[in-house]
Amino acid sequence: MSFLLDTNICSAHLKRPAGLMHRFAQHSGGSFIPTIVLGELYAWAFHRKKP
């Protein structure tokens, strides 16, 4: 089974890596990120003040 991740799931993972890591590891190889979400994450990371 494949899963398409949205921006909310990806940003929640970036804010609390330990909170969702077990879910990402459980479905490794079956998780996909759309190009739009990837662009939003790049923009979020670029405008972030902390490195």
Image (cartoon, rainbow, N blue to C red):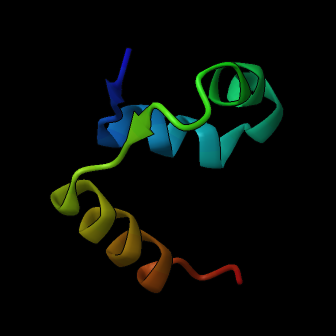
Rendering coords of residue 21 (x, y %): 74, 30
Q: Nearer the viewer, residue 35 or 44?
A: 35
Left or right: 46 in relation to 32: right
Apparent side of residue 44 relative to residue 23 in the rendered image (left or right): left
Seen as rendered, the residue at the extreme top is 1
- Is residue 46 found left or right of 3 in the rendered image? right
Residue 3 vs residue 40, the one in the foreground: 3
**For residue 25, what is the image quadrant?**
top right
The quarter of the picture where the C terminus appears is bottom right
Q: Residue 28 placed where, x, y %?
A: 62, 33
Instruction: Write the residue at 37% across / 34% down.
Output: 8
Rendered image quadrant of residue 37: bottom left
User: What's the residue at 38%, 64% (across, down)?
Assistant: 41
Q: Is residue 18 above or below residue 41?
A: above
Instruction: Give the quadrant of the N terminus.
Output: top left
Q: In this view, does 3 lie above or below 16?
A: above
How many numbered discs sit on the rendered protein? 0
Asked if 21 appears above or below 41 in the picture, the reply is above
Residue, far right: 18
- The residue under the point 47% across, 42% down is 10
Residue at figure coordinates x 22%, y 51% from the top left: 34
